[in-house]
């Protein structure tokens, strides 16, 4: 394949997550951190959850947006340890 200039089309790499510096009022951060803890999320995951929810409700969440990344232990599977003999 080639691009409009006739050169090779660059390979699409999986999109990396963006990093954003966010300044919050300390009391807002404390409330957010408590809420996140109540829902077993990090403050960062809670912010992303709330932003996605607001974008979806406003009809502005892109259709090809991937799911929230799951953190922690993968579901199911055998317990860790040596294989049975």
Image (cartoon, rainbow, N blue to C red):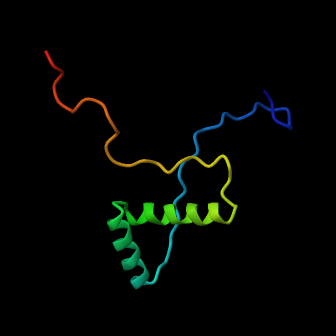
Residue at (66%, 46%) from the top-left corner?
64
User: Measured along the vertical axis of the image, is residue 29 above or below residue 12?
Assistant: below
Viewer-nearest residue: 12 or 61: 61
- Residue 62 position within the rendered picture, expressed as x and y whole percent measured from the top left: 68, 53
Left or right: 82, with 17 as reference point: left
Q: How many marks?
A: 0
Left or right: 17, with 45 as reference point: right
Viewer-nearest residue: 47 or 15: 47
Based on the displayed image, in which of its 4 quarters is residue 8 positioned? top right
- Residue 49 position within the rendered picture, expressed as x and y whole percent measured from the top left: 50, 61
Residue at (50%, 51%) from the top-left corner?
68
- Residue 30 position within the rendered picture, expressed as x and y whole percent measured from the top left: 36, 78
Q: Which quarter shows the C terminus? A: top left
- Identity of the residue furthest to the front in this view: 57
Based on the displayed image, in which of its 4 quarters is residue 46 positioned? bottom left
Residue at (42%, 47%) from the top-left corner?
70
Viewer-nearest residue: 23 or 40: 40
Based on the displayed image, in which of its 4 quarters is residue 35 positioned? bottom left
Q: Which quarter shows the N terminus? A: top right
- Identity of the residue furthest to the top in this view: 85
């Amino acid at each position: 394949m080639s691009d409009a200039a006739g050169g090779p089309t660059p390979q699409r790499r999986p999109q990396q997550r963006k990093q954003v510096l966010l300044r919050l009022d300390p009391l807002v951060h404390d409330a957010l951190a408590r809420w996140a803890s109540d829902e077993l999320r990090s403050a960062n995951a809670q912010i992303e959850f709330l932003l996605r929810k607001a974008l979806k409700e406003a009809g502005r969440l892109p259709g090809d947006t991937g799911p929230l990344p799951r953190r922690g232990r993968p579901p199911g599977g055998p317990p860790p340890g040596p294989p049975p003999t």
